[in-house]
Every structure is written in structure tokens, then in C-alpha cells.
Amino acid sequence: MVLLWGSNAREAHPIYFHHVLKGLDNGTKMYAVDPRRTSSTKFADAWLGLNVGTDIALANAVGREIIAADLHNKEFIAHATQGFEQYQAAVEEYTLENTETITGVPAEAIREMAHVYAAAGTAQILWTLGITEHHNAVENVLSLCNLALLTGHVGRWGSGLVPLRGQNNVQGGGDMGSLPNKFPGFQDIGDPTAQAKFEATYGMRLPAKPGLHLTLMFEAMERGEIKGLYVIGENPADSEADVAHARKVLSGLDILVVQDILMTRTARSADVVLPAAVGWAESEGTVTSSERRVQRVRPAVSPPGLARQDTDIIGDLANRLGVDWGNPTPQELWDELRSLSPMHAGMSWERLESAGGLQWPCRDLEDPGSPFLHGWLWAEDLEGREPAPFSVCQHEGPKEKLSAEFPLRLTTGRALDSYNTGVQSGGFASPIRYGDSIDINPTDAHALGLADGQRVRVCSPRGSIETKVRIQPDIPVGLTFTTFHFPELIDVNQLTNPEWDRRSGTAEFKAAAIRIEHLHSNGAKPMTDDPALDLERTTEPANG
Amino acid sequence: MTITEVSVSLTINGRAVSVPQGTSLLAACESIGIETPTLCWAENLTPVNVCRVCVVEVEGSRALVPSCARAAEENMVVHTESPRVRHSRKMVLEFLGSSTDLSQASDLAVWMRHYQADPNRYGQTDVPAERIVEEPKVQDDLYVRDYDKCVLCYKCVEACGDDAQHTYAIAVSGRGFNSRISTEFDTVLPDSACVYCGNCIGVCPTGAIQFKTEFDMRAVGDWRPESQDVTTTVCSFCGVGCNLELHTQDNKIVKVTSPADHSVTHGHLCIKGRFGWQYVQPPTVSPRD
Amino acid sequence: MADLFIGDDLADDIEIAAVAAAVGATNTVVHAGERLVYGGTQRRRDHRHLLLPALHALQNAKGWISPGGLNHVCTLLQVPPAEAYGVATFYEMFRLDEPDYGPGVSHVTHVCVDAACQIAGSRELIAELEASGAQVHRSPCLGQCERPPAQFHQGIGRPDLVPADFAAGGAGLGGSPTEKIPQQGDPSLRLLRNVGVVDPTSLEAYRANGGYQALDRAIAMGADAVCSAVAGSGLSGRGGAAFPTGIKWRAVAAEQGRPKHVVANCDESEPGTFKDRVVMENDPFAVIESLTLAGFATGAENGWIYIRGEYPLATARLQNAVNQAQDAGLLGSNAAGSGQRFDIEIRRGAGAYICGEETALFASLEGFRGEPRSKPPFPTTHGLFSEPTAINNPETLINTLDIVLYGAEQYRRRGTERSPGTKLLCVSGRVTKPGVYEVEFGVSLGEVLALAGPLTGSGRLAAVLMGGAAGSFVGPDALDLPLTLEDTRERGTTLGSGVIMAFTDEIDMTAVALRIAEFFRNESCGQCVPCRVGTVRQHETMLQLQTAGGLGAKRRKLIEDISQVMVDASICGLGHTAASAINSAFDLGLLPGGRNDDN
Ligand SMILES: Cc1cc2nc3c(=O)[nH]c(=O)nc-3n(C[C@H](O)[C@H](O)[C@H](O)COP(=O)(O)O)c2cc1C
Ligand code: SF4
Ligand code: SF4
Ligand code: FES
Ligand code: FES
């Protein structure tokens, strides 16, 4: 059984979804939870259209129903978990009826989903940004983890919790230590053993205190505590929530250095641009996918003009700053990582080549890698670990409440043929791209007197933009939707809520309050198109 | 397919062979170095066994059997070079050569020579042999469908449908010799269900479906497979980890495929992986300039 | 359910109403509420078999299947439009382009151009009809070969009909048993005993003449004993392949744990064959009773009748029989008191010879293109919906009534040791009394022709087509041939579906052979290369024969080469037999002799 929750994998992870489809063809049942009736949900045995931001209530109700129907896995709970009693008490108020009121999903469907999930031989919960782009993202995730703990649908072949990663190497980035509080291999900064090991290898003292994540960095920049920023392969001038603010903050820096393959909006406002090679087509290295599979990338073409490998640029920079890092090959860098990160130790360059990728943890050369995690939950002695904790999560709803002034909910997502801020996917002429628009239900459109294709103004408490209306029966009443692929056309991140989850640093992209206004023939200015960004490959360093 | 540890023993061309139960005769032949022509079979698709170019003779079976779809059975006696087998393979190749444009089906050319197939012996001036005549369908900037090269192997339909993409934008329409791969009412692709995953291109054995880049380069005589390289790498567009094979010519990417044996993709991609590379470099030629 | 893309064209009210009447207005895959939608792969699969009835409804409503109509059906049944289009274009009876008929056209007249009608003036009839402004469609055999040239009216906004049914006064259901068969009243008739005698529209009349005694007896005997009796009788399939029925039933009976099906293959499209039609129209309850009996014997709860689309009267009478049987409790949750559920659904084909091939029939019924599937696996394990299925010809089925009633031994008293029982023969061509004959296996070909005789035309026999287009020609020297499975096989011919079509020596046999070649070319499903291209190349070579008045050595070799690959490498029986009649015509010297040149 598959519980697809807040994920439009059909469009955002199409090849992963092929595997889901194979399962469905073979008789797997799928329940889909999503405010929108996305293309993924159309493959489901049932779609449950909940109100935006009510995931925790729904998850708690499912948990409560599983317990009430005595379908929870008592043996597993006793063996491998802790905190069940508190959890049971906490979900008590989430009766089917209460939850129907909160979520808008018929009680009967919640009951049915709970029963099917609990009774399944194997079951997976899949989620994407629908769960994580909320101010209470971590609680959202934990509320789903509770369901897996309740039923024992975790740590076994075919069962588990599957967060789908949006980018080819977000997993790898974290693995490599691109987190403010971690060394590569998820070793804690400040942990004396790890600290000593890394300092010995790097030959220098390392800060023992975690750094800042992106959202905190912006706050620090705003306060003037950070004066210079070195951006590698990111486009925060388009991708941050409340971009107008983000752009202002960036422009107040003393120095902005951008290393990128394309002349993005952020690069255009930089003091120094360092043109780089395209990671997956012009460089040697590895990336790590959602399933923790490390795979090799290889150069097929040489970078244009003066664009250089990231490693070369960074090495040179180090050199200018007075350290000599030599000229290591990607394989040498990888071997250094293996010596420092035990979970990568078994992944020799040769094995990555011959096995076509390995899944961490892979601790030595004999280790075949790990297709799934958390198997220890089923081990006799839990491999010496603490039992997994249930978490008490309470329903809060979106920070930004609907009001008379802003009566519609706006949520965002991806379309199949486009990607993130459109920087890369803008490069080919997709016949199925429908351009900037805001999706709205026919009933709401009728009430507002809107026609399909009509241009309108969309206002949130933070700003307003112009776009065109797309009438979509698949959107529930009261909800609107737009992709975030057209920042230069529909600056949706001017509307989204910068309230972010304090634990994950992710902003609440999924739930803003808006209203839609007619454009008046007089008065309102026609939208001045931001001059279409010229995203040709940068070949010259723009040296300030 | 469930291939268990149980093995079966059979005889192929007089040689004893033992293979795991569930192994196709095609794979059994391959295991002892016997090469078999195939057209509608692919390792990443369910066998439809319609082309019949892979037939072999199984003693006790009245008709020849498609080796790609028939599993090896205990004590089977198989012949791959008998006169009946050679005749059928030759005739299938002749039939296809006499009715479709196989100029880009390079694998078949080798087998045509091997079986001395002569597609020109059909038709006379008074009654010419009917051929499939279709204009190339150029309906967008991504790929071209040129159905007079189509041998109706059903691969694209399977890749678009149940075997991978589940989009069902194309199906076989019509009947008999008038069968064609088609959208509903032959509507143009941009108005159809097509989501441009390009998985049909990936499986087409004859070039009936091909990248627009390849089509354009061929049109100006600049398609040079012999000077192309293939590099396997990983797609940059989401976190699934699809392997890409970048086909390059003169330091330019000219098309993208995925290895059929890769456990993530099974050779299938989405629009971003298949066509999203164009930002790395603009398309090579445009004959319309 | 899937994320289907449905275009902008909309159905009109007529189309929507027609589809609702055919598949039920609420019978949709997607059950939509505002915040809860049920769908899914299983529901989608469960509804797919309604596609063919829905397409029929559209075609009938407007005289074609419009893009809007197709979109509507695809939305209801969640079928991808490209697939639905692929299915619709497979069938002769469906049009996908808007016809330019003038106003008030109420039907299209299908006129048969196959052999029996070809030699009885179908060409002249077509010319006449076209001159009168009728919309004419040239059709393969319409299963009315005893009354050539045959016609069928495909209705637009009104039901389909066969004009000859009205001539005979038998149209609709109200009619009495008016069919006159040549052997009417012969007390030795078994399979045809009710034909023309018992009112085919009345269950009461059927029962009064001994109907449903066999089913009662079967239930009393138990399923196992019924299978034993059928196996012991030596009954073999009458659809053409002559497979032992008892073995088939036993195999299905042995399958446990999955839904099972019995199917009556009433597609009857083999040129020259019309016996099933005569039985279905005039003794429909026998078909229903015997199908129920088959369901009981095999433990199958689902009965299906797949009947060719050009048989409106037989369809109506079978449907009437099903309804009456249902009302009488002879079908349903406790069918005839058997303690077992058994229901029958009737499905119309839409003009495709290949859909008589059993696996193609399953595909068609399931809502896919009528393309045969590879065997193995066989229908007894992977039949309809990939579930265990016993499929039989209706003539095969009605034989089981006597077997159960009187026992295998009694049954075996007729016919020969290896071909027990009686056989229905479809006698047509140049004979005085064409029609269906029931004879014991073992009578000679000459005796049968004498029954239907004397010959008409020149009166001099040139050849007899045995077993239909998929069979072969025999010459006048074969009049002594005993009509049994074993003797025909030994003489290199076949009884097939019971076709005996007589040709006298004034007939242009080249034209007949050419038409047979064209038939296979048109009817090939197109799936496999040997048959898709082979039937075309064979037809072209026959055209060359006609234009050049003979074939040189190279072309004769071609004919042989083509025939060999079709026999050896085709997927199904259509390709396997597509060259057989033509080969036999060459062998018998019915076609212009070889020429000496090289071509
Ligand atoms: C091209 C082709 C057409 C066929 N048409 C029919 C048909 O119209 N009716 C029929 O009963 N069997 C037909 N058959 C035979 C069926 O495949 C199958 O053998 C038969 O329905 C089994 O029933 P039986 O055992 O009672 O004969 C056809 C076979 C082929 C190859
Ligand atoms: S277009 Fe290509 S893949 Fe599709 S059926 Fe034709 S030859 Fe096969
Ligand atoms: S032999 Fe002919 S009819 Fe049968 S599957 Fe092949 S193409 Fe279709
Ligand atoms: S490759 Fe086996 S039938 Fe086509
Ligand atoms: S109806 Fe014309 S040949 Fe059968």
C-alpha cells in the first residue's frame, strides 16, 4: 500500500513514479492526500483533498483510528518505540468527526485509509514539499513517522517513510557536510572525536560551533552581521520566500560573489561572477540521489569559454587566500571523504563505476550498501540503540489565516516540464508549458466573475503581481495554485510567507492568503515585463 | 519475471544447455553464443512477440515459436538454423524491407545480408508492392515521427503505456496493413496527451521516432554516428538519480538516452532528463535558417 | 484511473443519452465528491469491457464516432483516448470520420462480396443500390450465404436490421418460428430439432418441448459427472479447430480460487458459415441452456455471449431468452436451483473476422483491439480477463444437451468412432437448396450435395470449398470423401466450421481466389509481420495472376515462400490458414496454368 502525502511525484519525480505505477499495476493500493487533485492523485484508489496545512490533524486522526480499531502493531510498539501512551493521549481529540471539520475530508475516507494502511502487509508513506514547505514542517514529518511506528511499517523491505528529494544532489550536499551543524557523513560539529579527526586531516583548527542556515544567514545579513556572501549554484534572488525583501538584503552586502553556470538574477547583481562548469555534463564527480545512492557523473562536453571546474575555482581561491590545496583529482577528493566518513568508506571509485551506484551506509569494500534504513528497529537488541520515540504533534494550521481581505488560499508546486526557478528548464522549448498563471476552481472563478485566460492582479499581505487565470476543476473551492517556475513573470515568492520552520529552515511556500482582483482598464498599469532574462551560458568572468 | 533457482535442461542445435527456469529461449541461445535477430523485443519492455524475426523451431511444435517470448522448458529440442527458421527470418526481413524504409535500422541491415533477404523481389510494374508512405510529422521542437520507417514493433506504445510512462498518448490504430501508430484522431502531438518523455524515441529500432536534433542534422548531412561519443552521467533535475547517456558529436550533446539495464530508469526518462540539456548549449543546427 | 488527457471536443445530448443507455449513466470509473474521489487501477480495469458497447452506442446514434463522443466515453470509462481510437478503428462497423451522407439517411447497406454472394451477383446488386442513392458498404461474408447476395442495414439513429428477416416474416421478437430449413420435420434431427418448430421467443414453448431437462439432469448428476459424460462422448469443438470439449471443460473445472468464465463464441465470420446464426435465431434457449450447463460443469459463474455485430435478430432473440431465463430463475444467484451463481452478458462484435479467434475475442470483449495473444498460456488458465475460461462454439454447446440427457454411449451411436455425433453443414453456392443441414459424421460429400441438389449454374461441378476461406478446395473426385474429421484431414482438407460451397465450371475461379486473398488481407489484424505483410504480398501476386493470365516460375516461388512463412511464423490461425485455399486452388488446377517466362 502506498500513502502518497503532499507529493506530486507524477510530475516532480516522474521516473520514481514509474516504480509506483508498476506497483499499482500489480495490485498495490494507493491513497493520495493532497489539497489539489494533482496528476499523481489521479492514479490513486482514493484522493483525500484536505485543507492546506491540516496534515497533522489528518495524520493524528489516522493514528487515533488505527488505535481505536485495535489495528496498531502492539508487539512492535513495545519492542521498538517509546512514548506511545503520550501519543495515544495526544491524538485522542482527533476523532473522525473533528478531523473532518478541520481538514474537509469526509470522516469515512479517513477511517478507510487508516484501516487499509494498518492492515497492509507492507506500506510506504511518500512525501515531498507538500509536507515540508510549511512553518511547522518538522512536526508534519513527525506526525507521519508516528503512523509508521504505530503499524511497524518501517525498517522492513517494502515498508517505510520516503521523503522525495527535489534536486539531484540535495541528499549528497547534506551527506558532504553542507549543513551548518554537520561534518561530512553526518558527524556532529563540536563532537570531540569528529572534530579531532577532521582537524587532523585538514591540518587546521575548525570552528566547533555550528554555522548558520540560509534563512538565518539572511537575517544576519539584514542585521549587518554578514557583509559578504559567496553563492555557489544558487539563485536566492529568485528562490527565497518574500523575494523583494531577499533582493534588498542582497543588495546591501559589501560583496556578493556568485559562482554559477548561468547568468542568474543573483549573478547579475553580483560584484564578482565566477563562471563554472556544468556539474553533470562537464565535470567528474559524484551525486547522491533520494535513495542515498551515490553515482558517478562524468564530463561529456568541455565547458565553454572561461568556465572552469568548481574544484579548480575553489582551489584557486584558497591559493589566493594563502593556502595550497594542490591540484587534487575528483577521485582523490572522494578518497579523502571515504577516509573521513565511515558511511562512505566502502564506496571505492572502482565500485561506484562497476556497481553503477551504491546506497549508503556502505562501510567497507564487502558491504553491498543499504537499500533501506532503520532495520535495527526489528533487531532483537535494537542494535543497542534507544527505542524510536513517538512525537506529540498538534494541529496548528497555516500561520497566515484567511481573512475577509485575503480570502483565498495560495499554494505552489512544480510542473512536469519545468524545474525550480526555471533557470535550466527554460532552456528548451517545451510544447506542454502553459506559462504563468494562477489555477482557480470554476466555482470561485464564477463568483469572482473571472474567465479562463483573463489577466488579474493577485495580492497577498506582502505584495501583488499580475498573471492570468487558468480555470481548473481539479482545484478545490477556496484554493488557488501556481508553479514557482516563472519568477520573472509571476513573482510568486513576493506573495509567499517568510514564516519559516525554526528547525528545518524551510519557508512556508505552501500556504499564503491572497485575493484576486480584476485589472481595471484605467488606472492599473499593464504589467511591465521584467526584461526577459538572458540565460545564455556565461563565459566571461565579470570581474569587479 | 520470477526467475527461481530451479534450472531446466534443453538442447539447442544439438548442444546441451542448462538455464534457470523462466529464461527465454532467446536468452538461452545467447548463453551459448548463438546470436538471434530481434526487433520487437527489448530488455526493458514486456515481450509482444509480433515481429517474428526471432523464431526458432521447437520439436513437437507445429509452428515456429518466438524465442523472445517463449520460456525454455525441460527437454526442449530447439533448432535455430533449420531451413524453416532461416526461411521465416529471411521472409520477415524481406517483408519489412519491401514495405518500410529501413535505411536507419542499422542492426537489421546486418541480418538482411546474413539471410540474403531480397526485398526487391516483390511487386511488378503492373502491380507494385505496396509500401507505407507517410510524411514526417514535425510538430514541435523536440522530436519527429516519420512513420514510413515504422515496422509496428509496438515498442513505443509499450513505453508510452503500461511498461513505463502510463501516459497512453499513442496506440496502434487501424487494422492489418493499414495499422499505424497514432494519437486519437491523429491529432498533433502538442494537442495530445504526450508529455514528451521521449521514451518512444529511446525504444524505436528504426528511427521512425527521433530527436529533432538528429532529424535536422541528418537533413543537412551532418549526422555522423561514427564520430559520436556516449558518456553516462546523472540527470540534474530531481533527486531520483536517473542515469543519462549523453551522445555527443563535435563537443555538442546531440541526443540523450538512458541505459536499459539501469535499476532506476530501466532506460526511461522524463522530459527534463531527455530534453532539458539544451541549456548547456543551444541546439546544433537549424536547417530552417 | 490515470492522469488522462481529454481534448476539448464535447459530446452532444444524443451521444450522451446513447452512451448512458448502453453502459448505464452512473457506471463511471471515477466517483467524484468535492474532497474525496474514488478511482484507481482496479476500478479502471473493471470498467474497460464497457468500451465496445459504448462505441456501438456512439456509432449507432450518429452514424460515426465523433471526437466529442469518444472523449465522453473515455472520461466515463477512464480509457486513454488514443487507445479508444485504436480500438474503434479496428472494427469495420465503426467510422471515425464524419460521413457526408445527405439528410435523412437512416442506414448504410452492407452488401456481401464474399464467394457465395460474389457468384450470385453481389456486384450487380451493389451497382443497383448505388444507382438508387443508397449508402453501400462492401462487406465480407455476412453469414447469410444461403440467401445471396446478402445484405445488412447498419442503422443510424435506429436499430440495425437484415432485410431478409422481414422477407421471411421473422423480424423482431413477435415472430413465430418461421424459418424454413431444408430438412424441416425430419424426425432424426437432433441439433436442429426445434428449428422452425418451437417458438424461439418463448421459454414456455422451449420447456414444453423438453427444454431445460438437460440442465436439470446435469445438476442432478453433478459437475464432475457432466465433464465425464462430455469427455466420454468424444465431442470435439465445432468452431473449426476440433479440440476435444471434455478436456477443455475438465481443465477449467480444475482451476480453483479465481473467477472463471464460459464464453459462447458466436462471432461466426468464416466466409460460408451461417449455421450458428440459424441456431441462435431459431433455438436461442438451447444456446442459453447449454451455456448455463457449461458454467455449471466448469464451476464458472460468468457466462458471456460474443456475437457478431451483423446478427441483429439473433442478438435480440438471445437477449430475450436471457431475460426470460433470468425471470424464471434459470440464471442468477441460484441458477436453475444449482446452488451456483450464473449470469450471462451478451456482447456484440463490430465487424472483424479475427475476433472469432478465441484470444482475439477475449481482447475485444475486454475493450482492447481484437489482436490474438500468444498461446501458451491457454484460455483454460489465462482466458477472458486472464482468468480461466472455457470458450466454445454454440454448436458445440448444444451438443452437450443430448450428451447429458441420453448419455455418452447413446450419443456415440451416431457418427463414426473418431467423429461421433452429428454435424451442422452450411451448404451454399451452386445448389438448389442451400441451407443448414444436420448430418451424421461419415456421410459422403456427394451425399450432402445430393441432399441440397441438384447443382445449378452449368450443373457441372468444378470444385467445393470445404471449411470456408480458411479451408481448402476439393475437386469433383472428392465426392466420395466421408465427412469426418479423420478422413478430411487425411485428404488434406478440413471440415472447419462446416462450410460446403459448391462451384460449377462456368465460374471464374481466379476471381474467387483473388477475393479470398483480399479477404485475408483485409481481415489480418496486422499484429505480426508474416500475416500483415504476407497477406498483402499474396493478394498482389494474385492480382498479377489475374492481369497477366498466369504466373511465371519466380512468382509461383513467391506464392510458395509467402505461404510457408505465414504457416510457420504467424501468431494465430488466420495467418496459418491464409494461403491454404489459394494453394489448393493452384494444386487443383483451378487457376490459370504456369507461364514459361521467368516472372
Ligand atoms: C481467424 C479465426 C476465426 C475464428 N472464428 C471463429 C468463429 O467465428 N466461431 C467459432 O466458434 N470459432 C472460431 N474460431 C475458433 C476459435 O478460436 C476457437 O477454437 C473456438 O471458439 C473454440 O470452440 P470449440 O472448441 O467449441 O470449437 C476462429 C479461429 C480463427 C483462427
Ligand atoms: S514508431 Fe518505432 S517504436 Fe513505434 S512501432 Fe514503429 S518502429 Fe516500433
Ligand atoms: S496471424 Fe494475422 S490475424 Fe493472426 S495475429 Fe498475426 S497478423 Fe493478426
Ligand atoms: S523479437 Fe521476438 S517476435 Fe519480435
Ligand atoms: S453472406 Fe455472402 S458469402 Fe456468406
Image (spheres, helix red, strand yellow):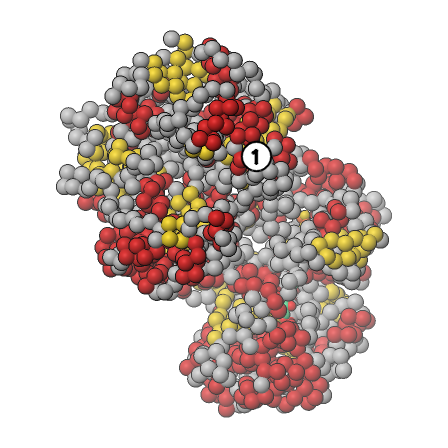
Q: Hey, what amino acid is under mark 1?
A: Ala
Is residue A395 visible in the rendered image? The answer is yes
Q: Quadrant of the C terminus of chain A?
A: top left
Give the residue number, with chain letter if any, for mark 1. A345
Query: Circle 1 — which element?
Result: loop
Q: Chain of mark 1?
A: A
Is residue B124 visible in the rendered image? The answer is no
Q: Position of residue C85 (x, y in %)?
A: 48, 51
Question: Which residue is pictured at 47% across the width and 56% down the height?
Answer: A122
The quadrant holding residue C422 is bottom right
Question: Which residue is pictured at 46% across the width and 88% down the height?
Answer: C204
Q: Nearer the viewer, residue B52 or A42?
A: A42
Q: Position of residue C154 (x, y in %)?
A: 47, 62
Q: Which residue is situated farthest in the top direction here?
A: A544
Q: Is residue A129 above or below residue C426?
A: above
Left or right of C253 on screen, residue C28? left
